[in-house]
Amino acid sequence: MISCKEGQLLDNLPPETKLFLTEINLSGQDRLNSVVTMHWSGEDKDGYVAGYELSLDEVVWHYVTIQDSTFRFDLELNSDTTDIDFWVRAIDGEGLADPTPAYLLVPIKNTPPVANLDSVILIPDTVYSVFSAQWKVDDLDGFQTLDSVFIKLNDGAWFSLPRQMDFVTVVPSQPDQNTLQPGILYTGRNAIKETTPIEGLIVGGENRLYLRARDIAGSFSLSDTSKVFFVKQKGNDLLVIDDHSSDTPTDLYREILAKGGFTYDFLDLAANTPPFWDPTFGIFLNLYDQVFWYSDGTAQASLGSLLHIEVASNQLQVYLNEGGKLFGTTRFPTTFNSSLVSGASAVFGFSPMDSISTSEGQARIPSDSVIRSTAAFAADFPPLICSNFISGADPFYAKDPANDIYTTPLKTSGNWQGPATICGRTVFTNGRTNQVFFSVELHKLNGDPQALEQLFERVLRHEFDW
């Protein structure tokens, strides 16, 4: 050991870098799309590789510790193809970089976007004035490369929308006219009204909606097309909504309305359930000055066991807030939520009902019972006579008892306790009645047919005449 001489430390050797691909021989339409996955590795003979630096110009370097990544390379505006220079260099444990970075030329091309109308929720075959459509657009190069979405009605001009827009509602500018006309366009679920109409809508005729998207390189997707749909003309200012499974009330109400000289548009919810309740159904309601809605209170399995009138409650409230008038009559199922707690029925929101009794037992209205108006303002509301024995009635506690219209004599079972009100009203900001609501089915109060006719006359021609 005495004879050994002290050696000299060797200089640190730089690491070496390798890309898994050294060349991409693609050109023309065979180029890669702008999303590319790259792999690299490094080796250091006298130490270890601590990380890597990546660059697109050999000037600005970005440090990473991973050995692969997926890159989305941007193309210049209106450019269809480009070549990307890519360098990577290994960095050893002492911070020394590979002086000869690995290099790859990446030839990329733009990929056209894809645009598809929703294939599940379609525009109905027959549209009652108002319709909505939703869609999905995408781009293999990344959503950020999308520029605009375009829709078109029939032979009208393409209408440009922001790339993130995926839902519109169209309303005829003249819904009571069978003619080619502009459509009023509402964008998004919050229904923002566009200042410019969309051209080409045919009321009283067949229509198609077209969709396409454009990316920043100016490439368009293939156009997607809806099936043909017919847009019906709005005929009257009164809308009658049939939400009943029996023809009996429909026949009765048709006769009453005919005798009273009322003309109306008719919507059968069983045959024409709105694809979109919010906002489409509300925009549809706003076409009408008055709405008469009768229901048997059937829970809809497809709507989470809610009633149609519960699902529509938000739009009914908006309709009333904007000056619409609602004449409603319905019974409620035994599962109806009657407490004003989280999850309470949305009917309590727009109607004069505050709640219903949670008492055990049952409230019943015997046949031939005389149901009289109770409020001073309701002196001109005729007495009604119950024509059917009504079991499981739902009299309600009113938000404002001063606006109760009808109370009823009850026979109870099982120690039932609760209110006797079956009809009340709500009042608009001008002090006029904008809603008359029955919590029993009106067609079962037809013991005096003339009285029921007088009730319709009172509500539709007097209470709602403003």
Image (cartoon, grey):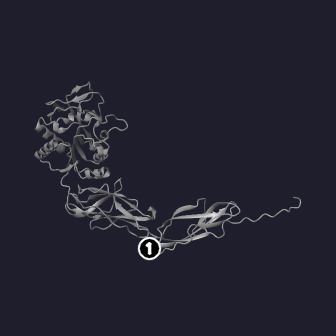
Closer to the camera in the image, 409 or 21: 21
Q: Quadrant of residue 294?
A: top left
Q: Nearer the viewer, residue 332 or 55?
A: 55
Which residue, given by chain and number where applicable, does mark 1 sit on?
Answer: 29
Give the residue at x 25% y 41%. 298
Residue 229's x, y, as percent? Answer: 24, 60
Q: In the image, is residue 333 above or below residue 46?
A: above
Q: Is residue 15 above or below residue 375?
A: below
* Position in image of residue 430 (x %, y %): 27, 44
Describe residue 384's horizontal placement relative to residue 344 as left or right: left
- The percent coordinates of residue 326 (x first, y second) are 23, 44
Q: Residue at x 24, y 29 (%)?
A: 362
In this view, the residue farthest toward the bottom is 28
Rendered-image quadrant of the N terminus:
bottom right
Q: Is residue 395 above or below residue 32?
A: above
Give how far across and how far down residue 176 sits, in percent.
Answer: 20, 57
Q: Secondary structure at mark 1?
A: helix
Which of the 4 image quadrants contains residue 358? top left
Q: Residues within 10 Å of mark 1 (few under 14, many from 20)?
A: few
Which residue reaches farthest right?
2
The answer to whether residue 15 is visible is: yes
Can residue 385 be seen here? The reply is no
Q: Is residue 49 left or right of residue 287?
A: right
Vertical order, 242 against 215 (above or below): above
Give the image quarter of residue 128: bottom left
Question: What residue type is disc 1 on?
Answer: Gln
The residue sitting at 57% across, 66% down in the picture is 20
Task: Report the number of discs.
Answer: 1
